[in-house]
Amino acid sequence: MSKIRTILDVIERKKTGTIPVIPVTTKFAVSRSPYSFDECDSDPQKYVEAIVESRRRFGYDGLWTDTFQGITAVMGKGLIDKHGRESVTGQSTIQEPEDLPNIKPFSIDACAQLHMRIETIRALKKAEPDEPVFTIIDNPCMVAADLMDGANYYYHMLTNPGFIHEMTEIVFEPLQKCTEMLIEAGADVIWLPFPTLGGTCISRKHYEEFCTGYNKRFNDFVLSKGVHLIVHTCGNWNDRLDLAVSEGAHGLHIAETILKDAKKDIGGSVSLMGQVPCVPVMMNGDPEMVYNECLDECLTGAVGGGFILSPDCGLSPKTSDENIKAMIEAAKDAEKQLAGKC
């Protein structure tokens, strides 16, 4: 069986006898390359070289594209942001309902970031065809919050919920089209982060009202294209993991939860990815601490299959080489200890 098929089987909760190690390495890999972040952001070939060389050097699994935020960049670019400046990124440009007519119509031709991500995916697939390509995308709710500004989004949850729904509907179809093109380029796994719309930031009630319905619609669309889908539950989602499961993704990249409980409560419905703390353990810990934490996570999460070892968020560029090696060593030792149970 090919490596990519094995990893996709793990995402589908099948027992494979393996525990993939897939850290989110977008910033980490670039920091180990001879290129600057700006160079890699503007040159897909340099970014791909950084990602591929880092994976080969350390021996972990999977390849990553950086986050696609092209909808925000096209529809809000040139508008005046909350600071009174003409926006380059499109962020924080739609402050009030009266701003909605100012939104620029989305154009695929004008979306430079989309074409760069497509080029990146194709180059990653060519460089390492047996590694799954994980493509990070802001989903419709995150795009709406980005255009509106996070704090302003929260404010209108309470004062004008219709504004949020209208904004989310406006970006929904353009994002679908871009996602379809990224999938057609060769993305194997769509990975959706929720840094500002999880349990650390908004209540379960507001999550249900403003996110769940859109998430289900978008997730159904992604799954209809035949790719795999993982949702990153940034922060503490313990009061709404059931909602995340109901939205239909193959897997959840978890953080700040008790893995044993999560495996028992939702492990029969979704695969689990995580959740080694990226700062106190992966960045600040020593190799022994990393090894012990990772081994424990694997022995807890991988029984019965459906577990990917990963830090609980993006891997810090300041993480030591020795700690990466300890993480991988722990996964291999756990595979031996579980002896076919994973």
Image (spheres, rainbow, N blue to C red):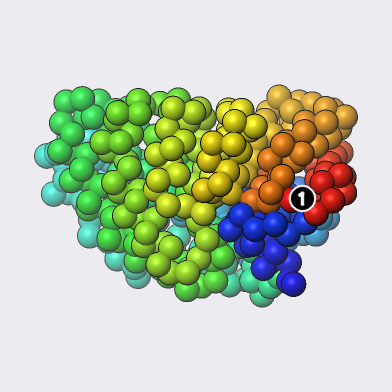
| Residue 73: % across, % down | 36, 52
Q: In which quarter of the image is residue 91?
A: top left
Instruction: Locate residue 196 relative to residue 92 in the image: left or right.
Output: right
Which residue lies at the image location 49% right of the left edge and 28% below the top edge?
Answer: 238
Choose between 27 and 177: the one closer to the eye.
Answer: 177
Choose between 338 and 156: the one closer to the eye.
Answer: 338
| Residue 187: % across, % down | 54, 66
The answer to whether residue 325 is visible is: no
Residue designated by label 1: 341
Instruction: Locate residue 306 relative to residue 57 in the image: left or right.
Output: left
Instruction: Locate residue 160 relative to residue 244 in the image: left or right.
Output: left
| Residue 154: % across, % down | 29, 28
The answer to whether residue 286 is visible is: yes
Which residue lies at the image location 61% right of the left edge and 28% below the top edge?
Answer: 258
Amino acid type shown at disc 1: Lys
| Residue 200: % across, % down | 45, 25
Q: Quadrant of residue 310?
A: top right
Choose between 7 and 201: the one closer to the eye.
Answer: 7
**Total tally of numbered discs in the picture:** 1
Q: Residues within 10 Å of mark 1 (few under 14, many from 20)?
A: some
Q: In this view, does 243 lie above or below 101?
A: above
Q: Is residue 112 above or below residue 331?
A: below
Which residue lies at the image location 35% right of the left edge and 28% below the top edge?
Answer: 204
Choose between 315 and 12: the one closer to the eye.
Answer: 12
Secondary structure found at label 1: loop
Quarter placement of the N terminus: bottom right
